[in-house]
Amino acid sequence: MTVREALRLFGTRSASQRPPRGVSETRCVPVRALACASRSETGQRPALACASRSGVRRLFALAAVSLPALFLALPAGCRATLSHGATSQPAEALPRSGNAELMEYIGEMPFVSAEAAYRAVYVLHTGEVFNGDFAALGGKLAELKIIDGGWRLNADDVVNRSEVGYMVCRAAGVNSGLNWRLTGLGRYAWRELNYRGIVRGQIGEYGYVSGGQFLGILSRAEEYMTKRELRNVQQTSLGAPPS
């Protein structure tokens, strides 16, 4: 089942059986998950917008006390992690055996995790679902050159736009763009996806990707592959929507 077919099946589910899709980035998520996130599509920091006043005061107090240590830590990188409170489902519920189920799960995520993104781009590239665990999946994607072999992401880490751009460009065979071809850097991959219309509405390569936005990127990437004859997508009948 292709990405678009899974999305169509996902869209036929009764609205009474699932929450609305396209979760916006203004949804409340834990401050600790996004304390070092870059700005969202709206230009706001959703974590701070949803934080309690006491939490904000503690955050600024901590910054005042340990600001020198913070600047020393930033070059080493800061990785947000989705806790169970940041998603509508626990991490262990991530589907591993069904394409449509995976797309539905991603659509409910405020921000896309590494494992969800890895599994989705594997489907995009191969048209098949990977049934192994996260470690095996990462090894397979590195072997296929879809992710950088030097990445050390945990399954519940939030992937940023540069990482999504890198994965989608590799999986969909987007090799255009001088900077992307010469450097192989994810931020230029994201810009190339934006130029190709696969990413819409956002130019900046810094920040995270919501579940709804990621589903749109996957669908347009698959359309790009079909037009470029990079993948022979066969249409199948899904039958009548469930009553």
Image: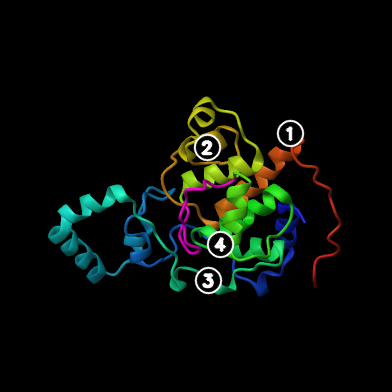
Q: Nearer the viewer, mark 2 or mark 4?
A: 4
Q: Which residue is mark 2?
A: 189
Residue 229 lies in the magenta-colored region: no
Q: Who comes first in sequence, dot 1 or dot 4?
A: 4
Q: Which residues are magenta?
A: 146-159
Q: Which residue is mark 3?
A: 91
**Screen quadrant of the N terminus:** bottom right
SS label for mark 4: helix
SS label for mark 3: helix
Q: Which residue is mark 4?
A: 135
The answer to which image quadrant residue 70 occupies is: bottom left
Q: Nearer the viewer, mark 4 or mark 3?
A: 4
The residue carrying pointer 2 sits among few (fewer than 14), some (14 to 19) or many (20 or more) residues within 10 Å by Cα, namely many
Which amino acid type is shown beneath numbered disc 4? Ala
SS label for mark 1: loop
Q: Residue at x 47, y 48 (%)?
A: 150
Which amino acid type is shown beneath numbered disc 3? Ala
Query: Disc 2 vs disc 4: Cβ atoms closer than 8 Å?
Result: no
The answer to which image quadrant residue 236 occupies is: bottom right
